[in-house]
Amino acid sequence: MQTVVITGGSRGIGRAAVELFAARGDRVYFLYEKNTQAAREVEARTGARGIQCDVADTAAVRQAIGSLPDVDVLICNAGICHYGLMQSLEEADWDRIFAVNVKGIYNCVNGALPFFLKKQAGSIVTVSSMWGRVGASCEAAYSATKGAVIALTKALAKELGPSGIRVNCVAPGVILTDMCAQVEPGILEEMARDTPVGRNGRPEDVARAMAYLADTEFITGHVLNVDGGYVI
């Protein structure tokens, strides 16, 4: 049994990851920011324990992860997006998306590192996006943060590998979660047609990829595309 910490675990991809790791017998903790009702539902369904915490809050993350008995796997899934033209993007929105999507990983990795370094073992899985690889119009801030996640993943894999810690990344494509709620149905249908496997993704598709990277001992610094071949 491993101890797995998943950020953004009350909804979407994070929820699917909590369900998968819990179902296979791992001890699962998940961080969530606001949706207490959803978190309680996940706890009831899975037996996982939710901890309310804003991943952008350094002190809160340190306290949340530091209170745990152990950490074997850290899944840095928490993320937010912003859709709109660059000239309409407020500075506060730019700062917040970087605080959650990039600083959140910094906070969570630093929270888990004492556990990993003590036993010279551990696995970190970050979450980027296909837009972190190729960029998306009207999603400049989101694309920039997800590109940063890829670079951070590769750098940490090199830095932490000698300490027995692996760091990998999943890069989802169009996944049907709440984040797609603002996208017109016609656009989603078009993107499904443009995907070689002929459909958009489900949260479970990404959760399975996370589990694979968390477990596979001879892979580090890898970015695994979970996009049905949309970006090749």
Image (cartoon, rainbow, N blue to C red):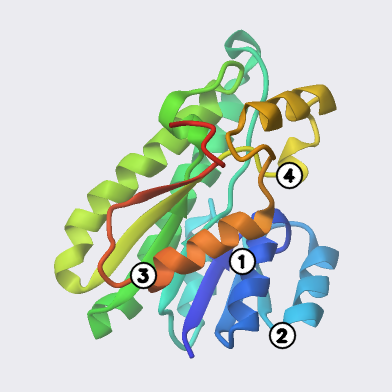
Disc 1 marks a residue whose amino acid type is: Ala
| Badge number at residue 89 | none
Q: In terms of secondary structure, where does tag 4 sit?
A: loop
Which residue has dot 4 on it?
A: 176
Q: Compute the Cα span from label 4 to label 2.
A: 25 Å
Mark-to-mark CA distance, 4 and 3: 26 Å
Q: Are marks 2 and 1 in contact (CB under 8 Å)?
A: no
| CA distance for labels 2 and 3 | 22 Å
Which residue is label 2 attached to?
47
Residue on which the image places disc 1: 17
For marks 4 and 3 on the same chain, the one whose residue lies earlier in the sequence: 3
The C terminus - image quarter:
top left
- Which one is earlier in the sequence, the residue at label 4 or at label 2? 2
- Decide which of 199, 37 is in the foreground and name it: 199
Disc 3 on helix, strand or loop? strand
Q: Please, what is the three-letter code of the amino acid marked with disc 4?
A: Leu
